[in-house]
């Protein structure tokens, strides 16, 4: 398993679409900014067959400091949950894999 960076994705998209690297970079960054902005507003993002991004509230809780074993209050926070869509699930499991 390897790590794919945003730059790697931009390079691939630019090559496959024969678009300018700068244009693709701007579009990809704008797309990511919009996702972050909508999640910050508490909105749910649904991309058919790809997946769903949504915000979940994690309640405040009492945890324990592993070094001192003292109780520590952990404040409530919001987390992003991603539910995998059909196409992603199929590709991950080897069904309908798109050839490169």
Image: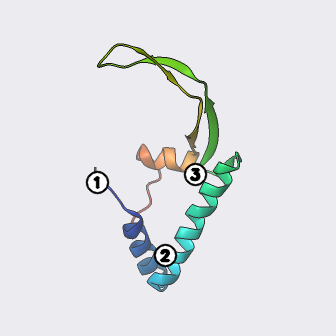
Q: Earlier in the sequence, mark 3 or mark 2?
A: 2
Q: How far apart are labels 1 and 3 at the CA level?
A: 21 Å
Rendered view: 89 above or below 59: below
Residue depicted at 58% across the width and 45% down the height: 85
Residue placed most toward the observer, 96 or 55:
55
Count the labels in the image: 3
Residue depicted at 46% across the width and 74% down the height: 13
**Could you say where residue 48 lies in the image, as x and y percent from the top left?**
65, 52
Q: How crowded is mark 2: few (under 14 residues within 10 Å), some or many (20 or more)?
A: some
Which tag is nearer the camera, tag 1 or tag 2?
2
Q: Earlier in the sequence, mark 1 or mark 2?
A: 1
Tell me the number on the disc at residue 2. Answer: 1
Residue depicted at 69% across the width and 46% down the height: 44
Q: How far apart are labels 1 and 2 at the CA level?
A: 21 Å
Name the element at disc 1. loop
**Could you say where residue 15 lies in the image, as x and y percent from the top left?**
41, 80
Tell me if label 1 and label 3 are in contact, CB under 8 Å: no
Q: Which of marks 1 and 3 is nearer the N terminus?
A: 1
**Could you say where residue 1 lies in the image, as x and y percent from the top left?**
28, 49
Residue position for label 3? 50
Name the element at disc 3. loop
Tell me the number on the disc at residue 25. Answer: 2
Residue 51 visible from this viewpoint? yes
Which tag is nearer the camera, tag 1 or tag 3?
1
Q: Is residue 44 left or right of residue 61?
A: right
Name the element at disc 2. helix
Q: How far apart are labels 3 and 2 at the CA level?
A: 21 Å
Q: Tell me the quarter of the image containing the C terminus.
A: bottom left
């Amino acid at each position: 398993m390897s790590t794919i960076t945003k730059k790697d994705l931009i390079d691939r998209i630019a090559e496959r679409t024969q678009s300018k690297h700068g244009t693709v970079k701007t579009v990809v960054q704008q797309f990511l900014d919009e996702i972050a902005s909508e999640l910050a507003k508490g909105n749910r993002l649904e991309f058919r067959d790809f997946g769903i991004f949504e915000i979940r509230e994690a309640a405040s809780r009492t945890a324990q400091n592993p070094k001192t074993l003292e109780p520590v209050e952990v404040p409530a926070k919001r987390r992003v949950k991603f539910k995998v869509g059909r196409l992603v699930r199929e590709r991950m499991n080897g069904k309908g894999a798109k050839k490169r």
